Amino acid sequence: MKDIHNIVILTGAGISAESGIPVFRSETGLWEEHRVEDVATYEGFLRDRTLVHNFYNGMRRKLSGVKPNEAHKALTRLQNEWKNGKVSIITQNIDNLHEAAGSIDVIHMHGELMKVSCEKCHRVFDWDRDSSVDTVCPSCGRKAIRPHIVWFGETPYDMDMIYALLSEVDLFISIGTSGVVYPAAGFARLAKGRGAFNIEFNLEQSATAGYFDTGIYGKAGTTLPEFVDALIRHGDLSFLNESK
Ligand code: BV8
């Protein structure tokens, strides 16, 4: 089993499920009663800005009552206690539960619910209240505020940094993602190409399970803390063989 130094973690909606935030892909295929193309594309925003502002206002209001769960806290422990290299967290989630659990330098590749940006001056602002078509940009004064969210067809944030992290990863861990949305779903293949050991934590096999050396299936709030504490204790993955 190879030496483990740099760890890269990718999280999806599944890590926040036990905190009470609904995941994206459910049986209805709807997303909080809306069609994805109406609320998660720029075209949808152009068609009905008020609908989209209110969609995210509703999510943002709910976030104030949501707490990080044991899976988020386990990643913070790993960041604090892993001494053999870097522990980087890349999330597809727009909630702030990694930060609320104490994790640092979290890369929000699909944006953040608690931020808005200006379509004119492109500045980004912390935002904990509702936004609308009448919201005035605190910097340039124009009514051009939008949710700071990456919609389908838009370029995810910090991709250069993400590719740099994946070029020197020894252990790639994916948690709570269905492996459907790219480019995030392609990270396991990139890590594998770098020679990393890949592990997925999910309820069931993701669409990209084939790029993982092993999967640990079950609720991340239970499976992840056990794994993280064993990894910190051993400093490597030898315990995985023992548990087989
Ligand atoms: C881009 C913001 C170019 C909104 C989101 C055809 C084929 C392939 C790709 C494409 C294609 N056509 C277009 C594309 C590209 C497209 C894409 O991938 N489409 C898919 C749908 C086919 N991607 C894009 O447009 C992206 N941009 O490609 O730009 C580019 C490329 C490279 C470099 C530069 C530029 C932009 C995508 C971003 C879209 N915005 N969100 C918002 O959040 O409000 S994506 C949305 O889906 C969320 O961000 C979410 O995080 C993400 C992924 O979903 P998951 O997190 O995986 O959630 P899901 O519900 O699917 O799964 C949850 C999983 O958790 C399940 O597996 C479940 O089993 C598990 N689970 C549940 N409970 C638990 C659990 N696991 C453990 N414990 C539990 N308790």
Image (cartoon, rainbow, N blue to C red):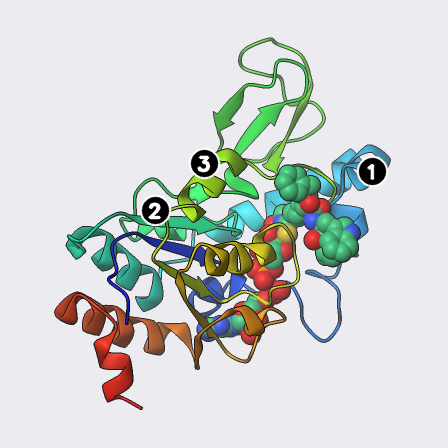
Q: Is residue 128 above or below residue 93?
A: above
Q: From the image, tell me which residue sits under label 1.
A: 43
- Amino acid carrying label 3: it is Met
- Amino acid carrying label 2: it is Glu
Residue 54 shows in the view: no
Does residue 174 appear left or right of residue 117 in this picture? left
Which residue corresponds to the image point at 57% horizontal and 44% vertical from the top-left?
Answer: 110
**Mark 2 closeness class: few <14, some 14–19, many ≥20 residues within 10 Å:** some
Which residue corresponds to the image point at 74% horizontal and 41% vertical from the top-left?
Answer: 153
In this view, the residue in front, 216 or 141, is 216
Give me the disc on residue 99: 2
Residue 124 rendering spot, x and y as whole percentages: 52, 24
Q: Secondary structure at mark 3?
A: helix
Ligand 1's image quarter is bottom right
**Mark 3 closeness class: few <14, some 14–19, many ≥20 residues within 10 Å:** few
Q: CA distance from mark 2 to mark 3?
A: 19 Å
Does residue 97 appear left or right of residue 30 in this picture? left
Q: Report which quarter residue 196 is drawn in.
A: bottom left
Which of the two labelled residues, at mark 2 and mark 3, occupies the earlier sequence position?
Answer: 2
Residue 128 shows in the view: yes
Q: CA distance from mark 3 to mark 1?
A: 28 Å
Residue 91 rendering spot, x and y as whole percentages: 47, 51
User: On the rendered image, what quadrant is the N terminus found in?
Assistant: bottom left
Residue that lies at the very extreme toward the top in this rendered image: 140
